[in-house]
Structure formats: C-alpha cells, structure tokens
Amino acid sequence: MRVSADVLVIGSGIAGLSFALKAAEKYDVALVTKTELDETNTKYAQGGIAAVMTTEDSFELHVQDTLTAGAGLCNEEIVRLVVRDGPARIRELVELGVHFDHKDGGSSDYDLHREGGHTMRRIVHTGDLTGEEVERALLARVAANPRIKTFEHHFVIDLITTGKFVHNHAADRCFGAYALDKKTGEVHTFLAPFTLLASGGAGKVYLITSNPDVATGDGVAMAWRVGAEVGNMEFIQFHPTCLYHPFARNFLISEAVRGEGGVLVNAAGERFMDKVHPLGSLAPRDIVSRAIDFEIKRTGAECVYLDITHLGQTAAYKFPHIHAKCLSLGIDITRQPIPVAPAAHFLCGGVATDAWAETTVHNLFAVGEVAFTGLHGANRLASNSLLEAAVFADRAVQRILEREPERQRYGVPDWDPFGATRSDEAIMVTHNWEEVRRTMSSYVGIVRSDKRLARARRRINMIVDEIAEYYWDFTVNSDLLELRNIALVAQLIIRSARLRLESRGLHYSLDHPTPLPEAVESRDRRRVSWIE
Ligand SMILES: Cc1cc2nc3c(=O)[nH]c(=O)nc-3n(C[C@H](O)[C@H](O)[C@H](O)COP(=O)(O)OP(=O)(O)OC[C@H]3O[C@@H](n4cnc5c(N)ncnc54)[C@H](O)[C@@H]3O)c2cc1C
C-alpha cells in the first residue's frame, strides 16, 4: 500500500498529537503509531507540566532552575523560549479539553505542585494521572478531525530520504517512511513533504525502566541511519523512585511524593539523603539516583523506601493512583514506606534540532523525547519534558505552515524484502534483547567507569554485527526491528559516554569524577550513506 499525505507524523504521544492537530488546520496528516494510539510515555506521566502560572513565580526563576539542573549544558536561548511559551501552551491544552486541577476544586487558581529541583510551585497536574488526561483530551480531538488519518499497529522501520535514491543530492531531504503493518506483515510506503519524528524515548535499552514497551529509541535509530545529527546520548535520566515489587512493572512513584515531604530511608529506617545534599530527599534526580544506587550497593539491599506516612490519610487523597496501586500490592502508603529503586526514565539527548524543531535532514522534524533541542542539557528538570513537547510541536507547525510543501519528484520504490524468509533462528532475537539490556544496566547505568564502558562496547558491537547479519536474511517483525534499534541506541549511548572524560549532570564516571572547566555538547552523525 502507498499512502500520500502532506504531513507524516510518527508517534501518538503529546508531541505527535499536538503537532498533528495544529498541522491539520492546513494540511492532510497521516499519523502512524506502533501499537494502540494511547500507548505512549505520555499516558504514564504522573507529575504534570512545569510552567510559570502565578505572580509569585517568574520566567527567570524557571529558567534558572532549568539551567541549574542542566549542569552547564543547556542552550540558554532554547531554555528561555520554552519557559516563555509555557503558559500559552498550557492555556491551549485547556482549550483542547485538558482538565487540570484547581485549588479546592474551584475554577480560579491552579493547584500547583512543587517537584525536585524547582524553587517554586509551578507544576500543573490532573491528580497524579496528568499524562492520561492529556492523552485522552488530545486523542478525542484527533478522532474528531477529518484531516487526520490514524494508522495503529504500524511500525515505522526506516525513513525515506533523497540520500537513499538520488546520488550526489546537495542537501538530504526526507519525504516519508516505510512502515510495517503488524497485523498483515506487509510493509507500506508513506510519502509526505514533511515528516515528524515524535517517537518518544528509549527506556527499554535498560532492564529496569519506568517507560512502557514502546520506548525503544526507534526514532533516534532511524534518524541516525539516514545521517541526521544526534547528540547528548550519554545523558540518561534514571528516575530514583520506581516501585520495587515482584508484581509491579514500570510503575513510578512520582517526584511529587518527595515534593510533599516524602523522605527516603534505607532498610534500617535511616534517612540517608540528609548527608548527601542540602535539599535532602528533594535533591535533583541524578543526585538522588546515585545516592540510592550507592545505598543499595553498600547495604546489599534490593531497594530503599520512600516514606510519606507523615501525611496520613492526606497521602491517599493527594496521590490516589499511587495509593490504589500500592494497596493492590499490599502496601498502604498512609501507614507504610514504599519500596523503590532507580529506573531508566528519560532520554535527555536524541535527534538534534534547531529552534524550530527541524533536524539536520531537510523537512524532517523531531519533537518530544526523541529530540535533542538543548533544553535539558546534562539533566532534565522534572516536568519540563511535556512542556518541551508542547512548545516545539507548536514551533514545528509554524515552520511548516510558512514553507511550500515539496512534492517529491523521485521514483520511490516500495519496500524490497531482498528474498528474506521466515526466521528459524528467532532465539537470536530473544537472547540479544536480554543481553543488550543487561549489559547496559550493568555497565552503562548510573555509575560508569572507563573499564565498564569498554566492556559494554565490546559486547554491544558484537551484538550489532550479529543483528546486521541476521537482519537482511529474515522477514522483519517488531521484535527484530526493536532489537536492531535498542542495540544501535545502546551503541550511541556508549560512544558518547566514552568521549565524555568528566562527570557532569547524569553522566557520572568513577575515573573522571569532576566536571571539566568547559561544558561541551556531544554531537555526532553517521558519515556514510544509508546503503554502503
Ligand atoms: C512513568 C513516567 C512518568 C513521567 N512523568 C512526567 C511528568 O510528570 N512530567 C513530564 O514533563 N514528563 C514526564 N515523563 C516524561 C514524558 O512523559 C515523556 O517525555 C513525554 O510523554 C514524551 O512524549 P512524546 O510525545 O515525545 O513520546 P511518547 O508519549 O512516548 O509517544 C511516542 C509514540 O511514538 C510511537 N512510536 C515509537 N516508535 C515508533 C515506530 N517505530 N513506529 C511507529 N510509532 C512509533 C509510540 O508507540 C508512541 O505512540 C514521564 C515519563 C514516564 C515514563
């Protein structure tokens, strides 16, 4: 099947949906997503969205908090424009039907939370299910919009660029993508003058993650394969407090719990954060994650505990979702501390973009967690990511509205399976999925060293070679495609981490424990054409 549209959107989280809704004011949009429309990182966001919403707060304070968290690597111009646009994007979400909580259930002032690293209360939220509410409201609008056609269970395999078909083309341009229809096994060709990567993060590169299964870094991997610039891949944010329980998977205990006075204690009940940072349990995420990692390794325990019992029944009222989930596992958060451990949570780097969300490949845009805009620097400030997605979705649309769509003139062939057959060696896929994630968790996690990174590099390179051999011989399926992507993303993380001979933000190395005097972003791109 061939699908032609003005705009191709890859992903159905806040980035893809907000962009699609605005782009559809002028253009026909095809939106593809690899499972159900609402299965996204966005849906699982609990805490909320950071924006300056009161007169006690100021743009300058939000800017300074973001820069402090970013540890010298934020692009200040980008930080300022995101913070400045924040309140307008929140108002727009409300107009689109998102219900944020107001004080005392009224309709005037928002009930603002405070989270780690923020000096003010500035997080708008919907209970502790903010992402679900945003996703619900945006999807309802998309469903009602006749100019947006959605394609569920379509897995985008690779982007289509001039680099693939036109030799010596002066500037590389993107004009669509190939996507596997997971229900029929056919590969369809989607053609469009503008393509948006809104494919989210890459938590699944690690064994313990807060992210849902769709977060396999596909966007970064496919952008890299067509030669787009990628940057700051070493900065992986680990969320310090993922619920630790044999029957809980990917369940996060929101930062807001620490914001409301939750205290981290070890198995002996000792508060270990007080001697680590002046903000104690409310210290920035990287510091808390490292301290928990240290405490777990020091004591041999499998987790630590987050104690919110001082709030009593108020804890159940403030965090109804967390309360219900924990209760279903036999933990009453109003009376008992919550067992927690750090989990891979957010990718600060990604596909490099300019201030209008365009990548280094013309007409290829990247918005949301897949993008590296310069906002987060070496560490993301809590609740700045939904904000970033809303702001850059808006800016990307502004850019495409003012640009004449280039209808591609090249003969794009349909997907050629090159005689691939069904695999009789699927064990390679299962085994390497586990191996990539285990290697990354053991050697490229919260605390790194030269030796650990070298070890990881050897193993991941071997796996990448094995996958490459296998890839062209057998028909593609989503397990294989995701494995190919997580292995490549792992390679990119290791590559950047090895080049950073310092500790900064989320990248902590035992061999290089101090930051270098000058903060430098890591940027790289593949230097050869897609087909070598
Ligand atoms: C548990 C949790 C809590 C969080 N809490 C907060 C918070 O409180 N505040 C905050 O600001 N941020 C929070 N974050 C981070 C934030 O949710 C994400 O950064 C943000 O939602 C990313 O939005 P997105 O639109 O870029 O990607 P996503 O929402 O992840 O959407 C990505 C989409 O791309 C699709 N996709 C991926 N690959 C392909 C492919 N190959 N083909 C087709 N489709 C593809 C996926 O299926 C999905 O639809 C949280 C994240 C998690 C996991």
Image (cartoon, helix red, strand yellow):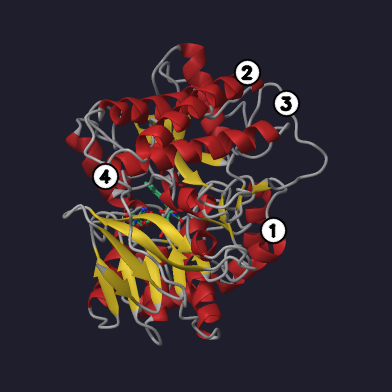
Which of discs 3 and 2 lies nearer the camera? The answer is: 2
From the image, tell me which residue sits under label 1. 75
Q: Is residue 247 left or right of residue 293?
A: left
SS class of the residue under badge 3?
loop
Amino acid type at circle 4 is: Asn
Q: Earlier in the sequence, mark 3 or mark 4?
A: 4
Displayed quadrant of residue 8: bottom left
Amino acid type at circle 1 is: Asn
Location of residue 371 in the rendering, given as x and y in whole percent from the top left corner: 53, 57
Q: Dot 4, crowdedness within 10 Å: few (<14), some or many (≥20)?
A: some
From the image, tell me which residue sits under label 3. 512
Q: Which labelled disc corresponds to residue 451?
A: 2
Location of residue 110 in the rendering, given as x and y in whole percent from the top left corner: 42, 68
Can you say whether 496 is above or below 172 in the image?
Answer: above
Q: Earlier in the sequence, mark 1 or mark 3?
A: 1
Do the residues under discs 3 and 2 have CB atoms within 8 angstroms? Answer: no
Q: Earlier in the sequence, mark 4 or mark 2?
A: 2
- Find the distance from the CA under tag 3 to the CA under tag 4: 41 Å
SS class of the residue under badge 1?
loop
